[in-house]
Each structure stands twice: as structure tokens, then as C-alpha cells.
Image (spheres, grey):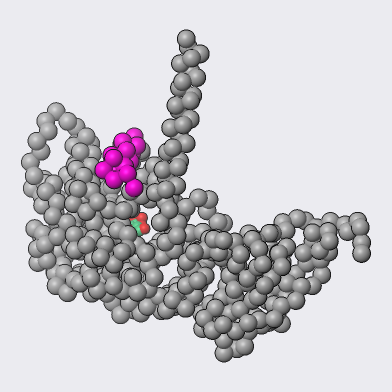
Amino acid sequence: MRGLLLLLYMFYGISWAQSDVTDQQERLEWFKDAKLGVFIHWGYYGVNGITESWSLYHKRIPYGEYMDQGEKFTASKYDPEEWAGLFKEIGAQYAVLTTKHHDGVALWDTKLSHLNVVQKTPAKRDLVGPYVEALRKEGLKVGLYFSLCDWSHPDYEVVFPRPDTTKDYPPKKQKNSDSWERFVRFYRGQLRELSALYNPDLYWFDGDWEKSADQWGSMALKDSLLKWNPRVLVNSRLNDYGDYKTPEQGVPVVRPEGPWEFCMTMNDNWGYFPSDTNYKPFSQIIRTFVEVIASGGNLLLNIGPKPDGTIAKEQRERLKVLGGWIQKHKTAVFNTEAGLPYGHFYGPSLISKDRKKLYLCLFNNPKNYIQLKGIQNKVASIKILGNGETLTFERNGGAEWNNIPGILRIGIPKKENLDQYVTVVEVSLEDELLLYRGHGNAVELNK
Ligand code: GLC
């Protein structure tokens, strides 16, 4: 009997695990092809131009003064349709908006706290709904950022002096519960609101590191999120319950395993921070994008709109320049996957989904010839994307009859055909890519 039970358990256990994996693969489908998303850090912190929430943590500003910024958070020029149009134009497939950062200020009309832009700011309205609607109109996927830690909630302990904030939270109905239970109910309630109101495609959690998965109830939360929307995606910051990894600020040196997204600021801050003029040059933003997609990830590039809802000139410019590069090279960007493994080409590359085209990305102007190693296929043609210049090529060395392919010497493009930032060389193969990954060996039977 016990044996039978064990067998049943194993059978159902395994098939359940398999279907979960398939589901996850299905849910991740659009995400794996997205390549570019826009991160939006919009909150009180842009009023004084200080660090989002962390200025509280580091005691750089008293709690009261931080919250006073709300009086100047006007959203008076907020035009989410313009935002969405811009995101679409540059080739982004999704965006992620901070609905609530660690400071606890909600950008929507939450019924669970008075600390929201409807009640506390001259904006006086829900700012999440119009964003969701505008993105959907453009066919973009909707991401909502939500900080699990909430440094304003009276039941959440903080490391900085905070006055009594209970008046900002409707009286607690639940008796006999301890403060942590109350907090968990509160934050889950807010997520229930967000899901019911906006049904996002993706939740971008943050701040999970402050508590354990058990404390947050991460597993139960993931279950609920999937119950509310079986197609929803969740980033990795829900302890171990996320669907994809989220490295931040430093481009990974080693290719992460599984689906991932790299988020990055354009200057050194997430929110609007006018005194921070340390903007990354266009070239760096484009190179980073190329490196990320060539390693199979998405870039979630951040903007920090001003308190009135407009996007600073420097940030708009960067979005547009990246968008221009993507437009010119869209065949390499979309419908491709992570490129060649280490050793074949000195630089990032991409492989088309049918595995018949390789895209070699040149960060520098080539000298003598462009080198590609270990390709066993016959090459049909090679050209430069964006202007169609065809390049000559010649195979050299190797011992083909022994499956040692030698190198492919590709002629260098005309100077005027090199891209200002990153030039992309399209190598069309006669059939599906076949790579030689050997260490080399003696040619035992020679011609
Ligand atoms: C960090 C910070 C937060 C920021 C986030 C974006 O985790 O805590 O301020 O919003 O990164 O990735």
C-alpha cells in the first residue's frame, strides 16, 4: 500500500513539476523576446532631487521633510500617452513603473493607506491607471514595480527616526494579530488592489532582502499572483520565487543562466536628480544594450520623470538615440537569441532564431580583417546592416575534411558604412549554424 502511495505521489509530483516548468516557459515567452524595457522611477524624491527612499534610510533628510515633497508633486504635465508613444517608437516592448517605492507612497488610489498621491499631492488623482491604459493602447506589456518593504507603515520597523504614522493608515480591523501579521495583510491587500485594478503583465518586486521568504510569505504570494493572473511574470526579488533574474547597474561579466533582465540608470540615480549630470554617453548605453542582448538578457533602461511628469531632455535624448540604433539594426535585435559562445568572435554577437544568420557587433573600427572562427557551415553572404554593403570573405587554414574549420577572414567595411556607435555585420549561412567547439587535434589523414 505504501509503495502504491509512493508511486502515485511520484507520478503526480513529477507531472506537476513538469507542468509548472512548462507554464513558466509559456509565461516567459514574450519576455525572452522583449530585449528592451523602460524602467520609470517616479516619486516624491524628484521634488528635492534626492535619493529615492534611501535618503530616509541614510538619515539625510527628516521623515517629515521628505514627505513634504508631496506638496510639489504635481503631475501637472503628465502625459502617459506621450510616454507610451515614445517607448513604442524606440522599440521597447514593456515598461515598469514604481507604483510604490520603499518610502511607502502609493501612486494609485489605495484604500489601505492615506499615503497616496490622490490624497497627499496636488496631482489629486490615480497615476497608475492612465499609464496602464496608455501602454496597452500601444500594445506594450505593463510592468508594475512594488516595494515589499514599506518604510512608512507603522507596523514596519525602520532604521531611521520616524514619527507616529498611524494616522495615515485606516484603523485596523483585525484584532489579536501581531504587527507583522498586520503588515503582511496590508501589503498583500495593496497587491490585491493593484491586480484587481490593473491586472499587470509583470510584477517587479524590490526590497525582499529585508525579510526572509517565510516572513513575507513569498510562496503563498506567488500562488495568489498566479491565481489572479495565470500569465503574470514576477522578477527575482521575491526571494526564490521569481521567474527571471535581475542584475542591476553592472553588466554581468559571465552570462547568467536562464532568463534575465539588466536594469541600469542613465546617470547615477533612479529618480529625477537634476544635480546628477553624470550621464552615460550614448555609446555606452548602446554598447550595454548590445552586450546584454548578446548574452540573452533584456535591458531595462531607467528614466526618472520630473514631479510634473515630463522627461528630462538628457533622458529623452538617450532613449531616442538608442531607439534610432535599434531601428537601424532591428533585424539583429529582434528575432534573435544570445550569440556565439566565447572563442569564436572577439565581441558580442547574436544568432537568428532559425540559426541561419549570425550578427557580429563591432565596438571598434576593424583593422586588416574581421575574424570569425569555428564555423563549420558554408557562408552564403556577408553584409553590413543598415546600408547593405556586402563584404568579401575567405576561409583560411583549418582542415575541413577533418572537421577543423579554420578561420573566416571577412573584409572590412568602407569607412562611411561604419555605424557611429556599433556596426553590425550580418553573416548568412547556407544552413543551420554548426559550431566547432574542439581543442584541435592532429590531422591524421592528410590530403
Ligand atoms: C535598488 C534600490 C532601489 C531601486 C532599485 C531598482 O534595489 O533599493 O532604490 O529602485 O534598485 O533596481
Residue drawn 45% across the image and 47% down it: 25
Left or right for 147, reference 32: left
Residue 361 figure quarter: bottom right
Comparing 44 with 328, the one in front is 328
Asked if the magenta segment contains residue 208, the reply would be: no
Figure quadrant of the C terminus: bottom right
Image coordinates for residue 101, horizontal then vertical, percent = 26, 56
Taking depth in this image into account, of 280 and 378 the one nearest to the observer is 378
- Residue in the picture at 48% in, 14% down: 4
User: What residue span does the magenta drawing correspond to?
Assistant: 214-231
Which residue is most to the top? 1
Q: Is residue 311 visible?
A: yes
Q: Observer-nearest residue: 328 or 190?
A: 328
- Left or right, 271 with respect to 393, comes to left
Q: From the top left corner, tell me how far across and down residue 189 is, in percent.
A: 19, 43
Query: Which residue lies at the image location 8% right of the left edge and 58% below the top edge?
Result: 119
Q: Examine the residues drawn in magenta and state their main secondary structure.
A: helix
Residue at left offset 12%, top offset 66%: 123
Instruction: Please indicate, yes or no, whether residue 362 appears anywhere in the rendered image.
Output: no
The percent position of residue 446, horizontal first and vertical second, equals 92, 61
Residue that sits furthest to the bottom in the current view: 416
Residue 226 colored in magenta in the image: yes
Residue 258: percent from the left, percent from the top? 50, 50
How many numbered tags mark residues here? 0
Q: Quadrant of ligand 1?
A: bottom left
**On screen, residue 301 above or below 439:** below
